[in-house]
Image (cartoon, helix red, strand yellow):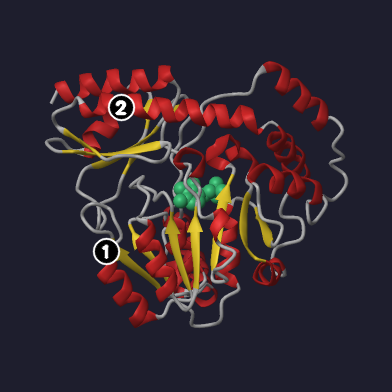
Amino acid sequence: MQNLQNFVNYRLNIQLQQKQKKIQQLIRPEIQDMLAYHVPEASGLIKLDAMENPFCWPEAMQKDWLALLSQVEPNRYPDPSAQEMVLALRKCFKVDSQLGVLLGNGSDELIQLILMAMKAGSRVLAPTPSFVMYQHIAKALGMPFIGVPLADDFELDMPAMLAAIKLHDPAVIFLAYPNNPTANLFKDEDVLSIIEASNGLVVIDEAYQPFAKKTYLHGINDFPNVVVMRTVSKLGLAGLRLGFLVGDQALIAQLDKIRLPYNINVLTQVTARFAFEHIDVLDAQAEEICQQREILLNALNQFAGVQVFNSAANFILFALLNDSAERVFDALKDAGLLIKKMAVTAGLPDNCLRVTVGSSEENQLFIAQLTSILRSE
Ligand SMILES: *Cc1c(COP(=O)(O)O)cnc(C)c1O
């Protein structure tokens, strides 16, 4: 019996080794070295970790939407170019008719499309910390990624940025405007200097535009190497997975060739179009979130041991001066609140946490819990 068990274990071990060998043989080493993008389990928790809009739609609007959905034919392929949705989108966001629009299954997919289209050996540059997907997707595609740490005040470190652009001549530069996780808008003069210094494409990622109000969307006609990326995720439609890239028509047409034909599904097309036609509801929600942000900033600023950074987005970054981010994060989670603990990164102080601005009730609960947690050191 014991011998049989040994034999079975031996066989299992051999099988495992063979599987690992196969993976090593087949999968590119840079992918084997990557960490999977981790999304924490959130069931039963109040989600203040992912910059989602906490509000739902008025009942009448929900009803109209469900009526539209009931007419969808899930047995049919979607319109590959989502024409009706794009018309509504152009109108809603006032996209210049001279500019092209590329659709992505979330702006994550747009980042992937941009990078996939670049020539072999192209390099990708972004300030750090910034949105992790720039680096994650560059790595997955085997493209060298150059991260340039932000200055202490989270502004772009311009001497370092310009030197890195000169040295590495990146094909693509990503600038999140406002930046995630630092929540600030970079200075216009710095953004313009980068655009001028770059031989490659400059992608201005305006995921948080609904809360920042500032945009480059209406000023890019004169800059053929600048594209503006938007998403409906933070505006309140994260579940739809819809992002769009606006830029020079000829450039967008090239990128559109490698977009998978049906990347925007029928439910998303119908729902997004409906939402764009009711943008006043989403705009009002964004306005409420901006007001809540000011209340939350003010409340966080009352804590002596907390350094709060200003925000032009729907989240707030703060650093604990005399406490561990891990302890506070865990204690909040035990109390039913999920926020984000920032990894230790160049360009960021130690012990940083990031909280999404929620509804008034959620924010008050967060502040109440934080008060008792910071008191119980
Ligand atoms: C959340 C976020 C995105 C991703 O948006 P999706 O459209 O949901 O993929 C892109 N850029 C930044 C800076 C973000 O924070």
Q: Residues within 10 Å of mark 2 (few under 14, many from 20)?
A: some
Rendered view: 299 above or below 153: above
Q: Is residue 149 left or right of residue 97?
A: left
Near-viewer residue (366 or 162): 162
Total numbered badges shown on the rendered structure: 2
Q: Is residue 137 left or right of residue 113?
A: left
Cα–Cα gap, marks 1 and 2: 34 Å
SS at mark 2? helix
Q: Is residue 283 left or right of residue 124?
A: right
SS at mark 1? loop
Rendered view: 169 above or below 265: below
Rendered view: 197 above or below 37: below
Q: Position of residue 274 (x, y in %)?
A: 74, 34
Q: Amino acid at mark 1?
A: Asp
Q: Position of residue 372 (x, y in %)?
A: 21, 19
Q: Amino acid at mark 2?
A: Leu
Q: Earlier in the sequence, mark 1 or mark 2?
A: 1
Inspect this view and state whether residue 181 appears.
yes
Near-viewer residue (144 or 229): 229
Residue 157, numbered label: 1
Question: Residue at 52% across / 67% down in the picture?
Answer: 19
Q: Quadrant of residue 29?
A: bottom left
Question: Residue at 70% across / 40% down in the picture?
Answer: 272
Q: Position of residue 219 (x, y in %)?
A: 54, 58
Q: Nearer the viewer, mark 1 or mark 2?
A: 1
Question: Residue at 59% across / 64% down in the picture?
Answer: 221
Residue where numbered disc 2 is placed: 332
Q: Residues within 10 Å of mark 1 (few under 14, many from 20)?
A: some
Question: Residue at 82% across / 25% down in the picture?
Answer: 67
Inspect this view and state whether residue 11 appears.
no
